[in-house]
Amino acid sequence: MATQNDRLMDHDYDGIEEYDNPMPGWWTALFWVTIVFSAGYWFYYHTMGTGTVVADEYAADMQELQALQKKFALPERSEDELKAMVADPQVVQTGAAKFKEVCAACHGEQGEGKIGPNLTDDAWLHGGSLRAIYASIGNGVPAKGMPAWGRVLKHSDTQAVAAFVGSLKGKKVPGKAAQGTVEP
């Protein structure tokens, strides 16, 4: 340990006196080690470009995330494919069963609307095309409290529910008042 002078500095703050001793040697050495380390770090990562910087790691992670999103995303369906499903009574029946299981609590058993909007009128909050209905079911509407059922249901069930909801369009079952934009 370094020798102490026990020499008081010439000032006094509220009765607190301060000694004028040098910093411990290990502390000074650590200070110089951090300076040398930072110079080496800068040279390795920024000058030579041999190390992976955070921006590169972020870009790699984002690419991996996008690949996973594509892997687990809802398969794209055309309006014609979905119209064919609406025309298939077996698909609509399957969709009706799944609708009663997962959707009826908010939309009512006949789509008349409870907490969620009425699905039997011509007004739609997020688009009335079959593709928009399919996307709303699969991706959900978190701002309105609707979960993304595409993560829970099989793709075929999501498509069947979209076909069933599409078949409800225009049935005008008594229920909740129309919400959204009227679409033909």
Image: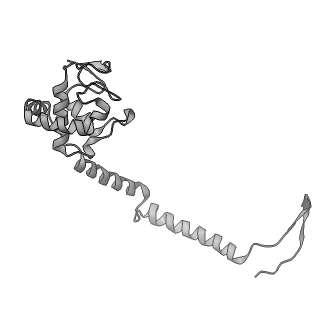
Q: Is residue 124 left or right of residue 94?
A: right
Decide: is 181 above or below 90: above
Q: Residue at x 32, y 32 (%)?
A: 106
Decide: is 73 above or below 107: below
Q: Residue at x 24, y 49 (%)?
A: 72
- Quadrant in the picture for residue 91: top left
Q: How is the image coloured?
A: one colour
Q: Which x, y percent locates residue 80?
A: 10, 30
Q: Which x, y percent locates residue 17?
A: 89, 65
Q: Is residue 92 left or right of residue 115?
A: left
Q: Which x, y percent locates residue 29?
A: 66, 75
63 or 169: nearer the eye? 169
- Quadrant in the picture for residue 47: bottom left
Q: Which x, y percent locates residue 152?
A: 26, 46
Q: Is residue 21 left or right of residue 109?
A: right
Q: Residue at x 33, y 27 (%)?
A: 114
- In the picture, the quarter occupied by the N terminus is bottom right
- Quadrant in the picture for residue 12: bottom right
8 or 156: nearer the eye? 156
Tag count in the figure? Answer: 0
Decide: is 110 above or below 150: above
36 or 95: nearer the eye? 95
- In the picture, the quarter occupied by the C terminus is top left
Q: Residue at x 37, y 35 (%)?
A: 145
